[in-house]
Image (cartoon, helix red, strand yellow):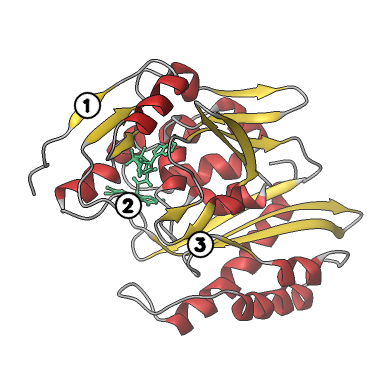
Amino acid sequence: MYLPDFDYYAPESVKGVSEMLLEREGSVILSGGTDLMTKMKNGLPVNGMAAPKALISLKNVHRMKKIEYVKGKGVVIGGAATCNDIAYSEILHERYNSVSGAAQSMAANQVRNAGTVAGNIVAAVPSADMPPILIALNAEAKLESAKGERVLPLEEVFAGPGRTVLERGEVLTEVVIPDQAMTGSAYFKYALRKAGALAVVGVAAALQMEGGVIKDIRVAFGAVGPVPMRAPKVEAFLKGKEATEDNLDAAADIARQECKPITDHRASEEYRRDMVGVFTKRAVKKAIAQGHN
Ligand SMILES: Cc1cc2nc3c(=O)[nH]c(=O)nc-3n(C[C@H](O)[C@H](O)[C@H](O)COP(=O)(O)OP(=O)(O)OC[C@H]3O[C@@H](n4cnc5c(N)ncnc54)[C@H](O)[C@@H]3O)c2cc1C
């Protein structure tokens, strides 16, 4: 349980971080360290390496810690914003309370004070709490490196359990929730304890209501597939329909078929499928009830 030896650097810019990642063999980004340090202490591989030789900290890259609203762009969450920054952000409370709620549902205060949104995404743990609601809200990830930058829909960042499409030298600097017509959003997490436990099932929904009809909807699942996933069949079924009990029950059944869970020490595949149905219905109802938020 001792940490292996490593070199430590803390550049003051994204370019500096990226250059170090490109120059130093065996280097990885250190953000809050809640995932990385646990792996290193337990001798688990990090980014395919037995043990990283150098940790490149983001702690001096101050621009990556901001959460701001940029007119014409949307809510910009810096990659190094912590889960508690997100949980207590006034901007997010006003615009997307569901995102604050997802951050608040994570771990304990100490972990939320250190763990960051980009760390939650790049660790690519299938049960991670931030991706489903951010995907439902159509969020984009900005990846910057010394060689340039690119922007991807968040759902395209994930390549498999513990794997992303980030290339060597790339830093996830921002998650942007674009301005949108969605009138409500919600995230439901089902875990084995009320606090401090990983999701057994996570379901997020964002939707636009018009005259009692679901005009547009995006639904995303966590912990029931190798990566956080959209639910296009549920979305297609609900689009243009009234949110009657019958329609929501039918959508829940589609959700049970559409998810791709496995059996593990937390729950069986069958149980997860059933809970995805239950929480899809609840998430849609809550998103409708939330109105703007
Ligand atoms: C006790 C405990 C409870 C937890 N409970 C939950 C929970 O309920 N829900 C949940 O979702 N998670 C949970 N976690 C997991 C973890 O805390 C979160 O995923 C956290 O958000 C990770 O962020 P971090 O900044 O600590 O990442 P780090 O550990 O610093 O990094 C994780 C990975 O991401 C990479 N990385 C970090 N930032 C960037 C960046 N900006 N660009 C590119 N790569 C980057 C690192 O190189 C590393 O590979 C828990 C962890 C612990 C220890």
Image mark for residue 227: 3
Density class for disc 1 (Cα within 10 Å; few <14, some 14-19, many ≥20) is: few
Type of amino acid at the residue the image marks with label 1: Tyr
Checking the image for residue 196, the label placed there is 2
Q: Residue furthest bottom?
A: 270
Which badge, 2 or 1, is on the more N-terminal residue? 1
Is 36 positioned to the left or the right of 221 in the image? Answer: left
Which of disc 2 and disc 3 is earlier in sequence? 2
Q: Is residue 188 above or below residue 13?
A: below
Could you say whether the residue bearing mark 2 is in a helix, strand or loop? loop
Q: What kind of element bears circle 1? A: strand
Question: Which residue, given by chain and number where applicable, does mark 1 sit on?
Answer: 8
Between 108 and 129, the one nearer to me in the picture: 129
Q: Position of residue 120 (x, y in %)?
A: 42, 45
Question: Which quarter of the figure is the C terminus placed in?
Answer: top right
Look at the picture and state if 126 lies above or below 168: below
Identity of the residue drawn at 78% across and 25% down: 72
- The Cα–Cα distance between marks 2 and 1, rounded to whole angstroms, is 30 Å
Q: Give the amino acid at mark 2.
A: Gly
Label 2 or label 1, whichever lies nearer to me, is 1
**Real-space Cα distance between discs 3 and 1?**
31 Å
Please give the name of the residue rendered at 26% of the width and 50% of the height, measured from the top-left corner: 49
